[in-house]
Amino acid sequence: MESKWTKMPDGKTIELTAEALIKNGFETIVVETMEEALEKLKSSIPSGAEVMNGSSETLCKIGFMDYLKSGTHGWKNIQEELANEKDMAKQFELRRKALLAEYFVASVNAITQDGKLVSCDASGSRVGAYLFAAKNLVLVAGAHKITKNLDEAIKRVREYVFPLEDQRAMKAYGMHSSTSKWVIQESERPGRIKLILVKEKLGY
């Protein structure tokens, strides 16, 4: 059943939101489909680049995670290095260093119409890269994540995103999630953050 948090905004709202994002320093590309989103994402990362990704239902949906695992991209896949490291202490240190990746790929939980990006994590292993650590941040998000304002964005996370993420965490890790770490990005120096905004419902 569609709710206020999954309803796709009209074309004009998407256009004005993209303009606000660009004004705030977030390079923003609007695409129609997830297939287009994947192609734009792939073309945003040069061959030989060091790539890390944050956990994201959106990236899975568009096929990026399968593409990353395929090894046909020519990138240095940091996530693969983490998976291959069985020593938990060493893996933890690698995970911390991964936030400094040349290209960090992920999504956001909400986007405000005045061009702010809102993201929330339990551990911070994803959003820790957003503020400064990652050299380049490439984000993919469905336009259904657009909200009227910051208050609505936070409500979206608490009322809609968190319950779904909590369910996923229980299935994947056998433990509950939490809304421990919040990142609100109001602006950025041009060139560091790219957002691929998709006119399809991707992730939550």
Image (cartoon, rainbow, N blue to C red):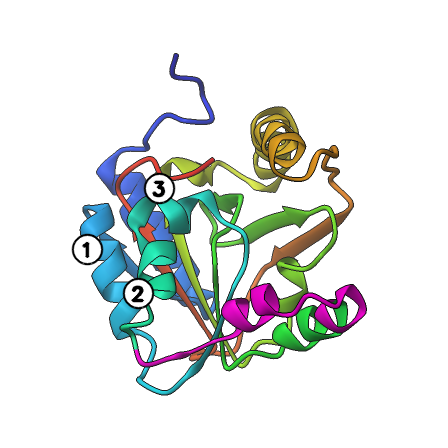
Point out the residue furthest to the top here: 1
Instruction: Give the residue number, with chain letter if any, for mark 1.
Output: 36
Label 2 and label 3: CA atoms lie apart by 16 Å
Task: Give the number of the disc on residue 137.
Answer: none
Compared with residue 143, is residue 94 higher up or lower down, i.e. above or below? below
Q: Foreground residue, 91 or 33?
A: 91
Secondary structure state at the residue bearing disc 2: helix
Which of pointers 2 and 3 lies earlier in the amino acid sequence? 2
Q: Image point 54% across, 52% down: which residue?
A: 55
Task: Give the number of the disc on residue 41.
Answer: 2
Point out the residue furthest to the bottom here: 48
- Any magenta on residue 80? yes
Q: Image point 54% across, 58% down: which residue?
A: 54
Mark 3 burial class by Cα count in 10 Å: few <14, some 14-19, many 20+: many
Mark 2 burial class by Cα count in 10 Å: few <14, some 14-19, many 20+: many
Amino acid, disc 3: Ala
Q: Foreground residue, 94 or 134?
A: 94
Q: Position of residue 191 (x, y in %)?
A: 42, 80
Instruction: Give the residue number, with chain letter if any, for mark 3.
Output: 143
Query: What range is drawn magenta here?
Result: 74-91
Looking at the image, is mark 2 or mark 3 nearer the viewer? 2
Q: Position of residue 128 (x, y in %)?
A: 68, 64
Label 2 and label 1: CA atoms lie apart by 9 Å
Which of pointers 2 and 1 lies earlier in the amino acid sequence? 1
